[in-house]
């Protein structure tokens, strides 16, 4: 009898990272893929990205509506509550043998709460990392303590998960699962990319993604305004801006993005979601990636493209030499972008070594999922 593996996705970015893992589960004769889709994927505000999942050849086994159209912390908490209710029903119907969850999002915490109480073993991908500027940091560690199996992206993260009391026998360093795209996802030709976006990327451009900081006293609107002002100092570069995620504070940034695009129609493209195939093709051609997305630190260095990481959202995360960190003010951002675009730094970035692996995580995870024993009792592992 095949082992039922439920994979959860709630955002466009997370789905892109999980894509090849889901494909490997589909191929396995020992595993059956169950797909649970929720949160931003089901929201028209964020592009109805569940449709892309279906177009990619996946069957969605459960859609769980949970995301309120709110920009407050209270709204986020209420969304989490709705998620727990919906996930309880979905998990009860599907009864997977294992639940795969990636990262640190509030919707992931909701489904893990349900799975924990329902005694469904949780498989956590990308645990042990730090993002000190977001409540995601605490959520990630909370999921680690709920999870039975752990697939981390680097050796320091494996050490940290074990430090949190997880047995070394259940913690595997496989590298970042999103890097599988480097070996397996074909690049979109420039002409096809132009036709798909309705925007010409043959001229030099910057790719911008900025999410709200949710823990520290960093005003997302003020910080994003500083970013927009800094971008004005580089008029020779076009700008592709993707929408922020659904964290509280994110919706206030969207009108600022749209206004920036309206004011600069020939220079700026604002888009809710690129989808991972277009995203990777855009990253490859960008002069630099600017913002505070984890992708700028984990995936982008493998393309030899400089990253400007703004503010505290990703504070504490392991990063390559091609990543520049700066404060969330106009002068610091402008200075960092200028350095990233300089020929010496751009040339050095093309030679950088990504500490997150070589792009073969999905197959390694599936081999372990096929054979792992989940019948044992999870106990706290004390360090000697």
Image: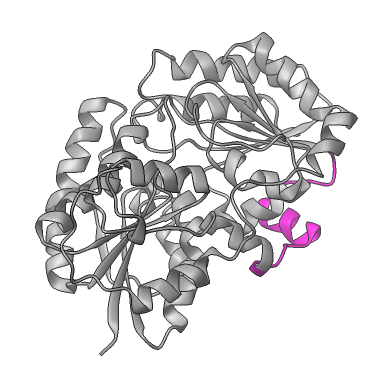
Residue 232 visible (yes or no): no
Q: Which percent across, then down, holds residue 121?
A: 22, 63
Query: Viewed as shown, does residue 117 lie left or right of 238?
Result: left
In the depicted view, which residue is nearer to us: 381 or 287?
381
Residue 223 lies within the magenta run: no
In the depicted view, which residue is nearer to us: 87 or 360?
360
Query: Viewed as shown, does residue 193 lie left or right of 359?
Result: right
Residue 193 lies within the magenta run: yes
In the depicted view, which residue is nearer to us: 267 or 244?
244
- Per the rendered image, the range of residues in magenta is 184-203
| Residue at the spot 43% in from the left edge and 49% down from the top edge | 126
Query: Quadrant location of residue 326?
Result: top right
| Residue at the spot 44% in from the left edge and 39% down from the top edge | 129
| Residue at the spot 49% in from the left edge and 50% down from the top edge | 13
Q: Which percent across, then down, holds residue 300?
A: 66, 45
Residue 201 visible (yes or no): yes
Q: Which percent across, then down, holds residue 159?
A: 43, 44
Q: Which percent across, then down, holds residue 271?
A: 57, 42
Quadrant position of the N terminus in the picture = bottom left
In the depicted view, which residue is nearer to us: 191 or 182?
182
């Amino acid at each position: 009898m095949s082992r039922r593996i439920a994979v959860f996705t709630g955002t466009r970015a997370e789905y892109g990272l999980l894509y090849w893992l889901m494909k490997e589960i589909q191929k396995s004769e020992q595993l059956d893929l169950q797909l649970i889709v929720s949160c931003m994927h089901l929201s028209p505000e964020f592009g109805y990205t569940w449709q892309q999942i279906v177009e990619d050849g996946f069957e969605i086994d459960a859609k769980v509506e949970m995301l309120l159209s709110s920009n407050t912390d209270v709204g986020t908490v209420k969304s989490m509550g709705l998620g727990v209710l919906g996930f309880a029903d979905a998990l009860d119907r599907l009864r997977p043998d294992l639940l795969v969850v990636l990262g640190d999002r509030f919707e992931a915490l909701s489904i893990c709460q349900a799975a924990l109480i329902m005694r469904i073993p949780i498989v956590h991908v990308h645990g042990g990392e730090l993002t000190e500027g977001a409540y995601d940091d605490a959520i990630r560690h909370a999921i680690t303590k709920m999870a039975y199996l752990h697939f981390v992206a680097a050796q320091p993260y494996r050490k940290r998960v074990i430090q949190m009391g997880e047995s070394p026998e259940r913690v595997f360093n496989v590298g970042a699962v999103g890097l599988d795209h480097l070996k397996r996802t074909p690049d979109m030709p420039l002409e096809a990319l132009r036709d798909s976006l309705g925007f010409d990327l043959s001229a030099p451009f910057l790719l911008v993604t900025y999410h709200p900081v949710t823990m520290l006293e960093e005003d997302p609107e003020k910080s994003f305004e500083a970013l927009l002002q800094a971008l004005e100092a580089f008029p020779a570069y076009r700008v592709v801006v993707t929408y922020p995620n659904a964290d509280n504070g994110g919706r206030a940034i969207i009108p600022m993005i749209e206004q920036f695009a309206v004011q600069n129609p020939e220079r700026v493209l604002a888009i809710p979601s690129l989808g991972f195939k277009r995203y990777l093709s855009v990253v490859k051609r960008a002069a630099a990636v600017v913002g505070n997305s984890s992708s700028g630190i984990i995936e982008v260095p493998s393309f030899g493209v400089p990253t400007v990481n703004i503010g505290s959202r990703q504070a504490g995360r392991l990063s390559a030499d091609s990543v520049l960190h700066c404060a969330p003010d106009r002068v610091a951002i402008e200075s960092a972008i200028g350095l990233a675009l300089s020929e010496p730094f751009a040339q050095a970035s093309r030679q950088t070594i990504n500490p997150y692996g070589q792009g073969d995580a999905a197959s390694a995870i599936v081999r372990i999922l096929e054979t792992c024993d989940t019948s044992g009792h999870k106990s706290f592992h004390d360090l000697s």
